[in-house]
Amino acid sequence: MPFAATILTLYPEMFPGPLGISLAGRALREGSWSLDAVQIRDFATDKHRSVDDTPAGGGAGMVLRADVLAAAVDSVADDRPVLAMSPRGRPLTQERVRQLSAGPGVTILCGRFEGFDERLFEARDIEPVSIGDYVLSGGEIGAFVLLDACIRLLPGVMGAASSGDDESFETGLLEYPQYTRPVEWEGRAIPEVLRSGDHAKIAAWRKSMAERDTRLRRPDLWERHEGARVQSPSGARRKD
Ligand code: SAH
């Protein structure tokens, strides 16, 4: 069975959007993955088809109702994990993306307004996921991010490029810097070592650049990487 994505949203017309073009779009048309965008409002029960109400305890904005969202989630009950886009969720990682892309697919619940009635997460098995420490106006763009990251890993979608062990985050590091022709541009040459043809030297240079850039740009990743090496010498050998 191909990777199946179901999006629960107030704006189903946003899909497939950017995922309908380029590699993801071709893979969608070829049936490597499938997409179903479901209108949450179809699960409202009152005559105004309301999906939200004012926050208990007061405050600005509107909160999405647990009963309506639960009905939407229950309508797709199957073996796929249900994720909810939320800045209060666990930050998405390449590791989680890999796990999801290797599974049957995902159901993604997209929030709007002030987000979800918290009881939804108590009553259903739903994993809140954040795409970063900033606030979007809705979960749909987060769903695009998550799906794009999963789809490029599906077999045959990107070929060898997406399985590279060197890619950012796959080793716990950022990728090394890349270059292409022209060899000289605005007086800047491609680093000599990359033109040497010496594969061992190139690999060593790339490793040291990946380490340098991770240390400088992402001290959080670097600390975790170094911590893992100290704790697990076999892990360190594998990375070398
Ligand atoms: N009041 C909420 C923000 C709601 S933003 C809070 O402060 O936590 C409206 C919707 O946008 C959310 O329900 C969620 O679905 C989506 N969203 C906003 N920021 C996000 C992020 N960083 N990651 C994933 N989804 C996000």
Image: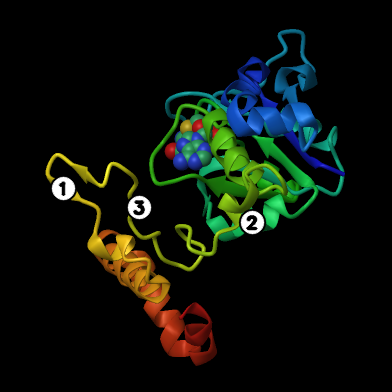
Task: Please determine whether, in this image, residue 228 is positioned above or below residue 108.
Answer: below
> Observer-nearest residue: 200 or 153?
200
> Observer-nearest residue: 69 or 196?
196
Q: Please state if 220 lies on the left or on the right of 148 as rendered.
A: left
**Three-letter residue code for mark 3:** Gln
Q: Residue at x 58, y 60 (%)?
A: 95
The secondary structure type at the circle numbered 2 is: helix
Q: Residue at x 53, y 82 (%)?
A: 238
Front label number (2 vs 1): 1
Q: Residue furthest left?
A: 187
Percent position of residue 218, x then y: 31, 61
**Three-letter residue code for mark 1:** Arg
Mark 3 crowdedness (10 Å alpha carbons): few <14, some 14-19, many ≥20: few
The residue under label 3 is: 178
Q: Residue at x 67, y 44 (%)?
A: 83
The residue under label 2 is: 98
